[in-house]
Amino acid sequence: MKLVRLSLGLVTLGLGMASAASSYKVTLPSDLSAGSVMLKAGDYKVEVEGDQATFNQGKQAIPVPATVETSTSKFPYTTVESSGMNLQAIDIGGTTTKIVFKSAK
């Protein structure tokens, strides 16, 4: 009976962790446009859930359309990829995660 309860507890914990949004700390070195949103330079906590990344800075939360891609190898550092003033992607250091931003039309 204890084994059944333990198994049920572990499954519940696993499902809770899988449904939680992933969050990362990112520093934008300059003002950048992500989709139709202008992000000011500074430190952000970026949470990714589904097809949206939310940039949190203090009490401000800025949602931006994004997708997550998985690289074949780990990124050694967190890097921001941009073209001009357009944010294209963020490679998350120490992981194989790449957050790709959709361009504004």
Image (spheres, rainbow, N blue to C red):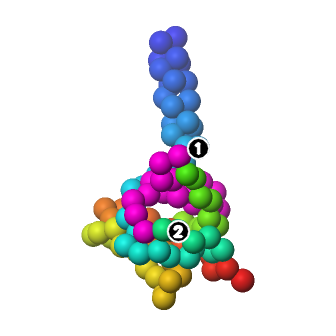
- Answer left or right for 33 relative to 44: right
| Residue 5 in sight here | yes
**Residue 75 in the image, given as x and y percentages of width and height:** 33, 70
Label 2: element kind: strand
Residue 97 figure quarter:
bottom left
The residue wearing badge 1 is: 19
The residue under the point 56% across, 30% down is: 12
Question: What amino acid does circle 2 point to?
Answer: Leu
**Residue 76 in the image, given as x and y percentages of width and height:** 27, 69
Which of these two is toward me, 38 or 99?
A: 38
Total residue callouts: 2
**Residue 84 in the image, given as x and y percentages of width and height:** 48, 88
Q: Residues within 10 Å of mark 1 (few under 14, many from 20)?
A: few
Residue 74 figure quarter:
bottom left
Label 1: element kind: helix
Q: Quadrant of the C terminus?
A: bottom right
- Answer left or right for 77 relative to 101: left
The residue wearing badge 2 is: 39
